[in-house]
Amino acid sequence: MTKLKISFMMIILSALAACGGTNTVQPSSTAKLPIDSKIQNMSISKIIKVKQGPMVSQSALVECQLPSQFPQLLKQKAADDNINVTLVDQLNKDAKGYQLAAEFTQIMSAGNAFIGHRKYSQIHLTLYKDGKKLSESDLGRYSGGGMFAGFKGSCSVLRRTVEANAQDAVVWLNSPVDGAKMGDMN
């Protein structure tokens, strides 16, 4: 009888783990509006800023190298949308053309592959053209999963949130509405 109970419990736990699954983060496309001229070229810093404070997991920040991942991912995603992104050592907001200032405002890293991940990244963007601020946006993305979430490491799951932030940024750059909040914003 005990083996039957244990088997039943294992089946229930497996089903619950499968229901939790690994969440995939998909970019939002609801903020896409027509604009007069499409951004074709822009610059962003190779390493973006991080707002210091309790909303940023310092261990995830150091271990996962997120400030350098976002610009790289943005460059890749933007190329798919015919936007050329130049990575610069230091962003000059007063330079000619489009400049994108980006800053992580939240990085949450809780859980693990055994109990399920709970990860979140939020980025604040400010778009400049020829030294004048055009608009700002906030992008946030969650990712997680149930028990045994594909045995993915924390940095791997956090990278998915940053990749979704990058895709949301491309959508926003196609229609840079001031004050836009995209993705999983509270």
Image (spheres, grey):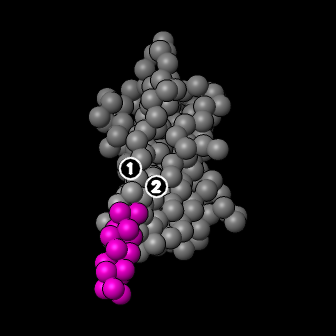
Where residue 1 sits: x, y (%)? 33, 85
Main secondary structure of the magenta stretch: helix
Where residue 98 sits: x, y (%)? 50, 31
Residue 34 appears anywhere in the view: yes
- The residue under the point 38% across, 50% down is 24
Question: Would residue 82 be counted in the magenta stretch?
Answer: no
Q: Residue furthest right?
A: 53
- Are the residues tagged 1 and 2 within 8 Å (C-beta)? yes
Where residue 154 sits: x, y (%)? 43, 68
- The residue under the point 35% across, 87% down is 2
**What element does badge 2 sit on?**
strand
**Is 40 placed above or below 101 here?**
above
Question: Which residue, given by chain and number where applicable, does mark 1 sit on?
Answer: 24
- The residue under the point 49% across, 26% down is 30
103 on left or right of 146: right
Check disc 2 and give the amino acid type. Ser
**Is 100 placed above or below 46 here?**
above
Instruction: Name the quadrant of the C terminus.
Output: top right
Residue 173 appears anywhere in the view: no
Marks 1 and 2, the one that precedes in the sequence: 1
Rounded to the nearest angstrom, the CA distance separating label 1 from label 2 is: 6 Å
- Name the one closer to the observer, 146 or 118: 146
Where residue 28 sits: x, y (%)? 46, 34
**What element does badge 1 sit on?**
loop
Query: What residue range appears in magenta?
Result: 1-17
- Name the one closer to the observer, 86 or 141: 141
Question: Which residue, given by chain and number where applicable, does mark 2 sit on?
Answer: 143
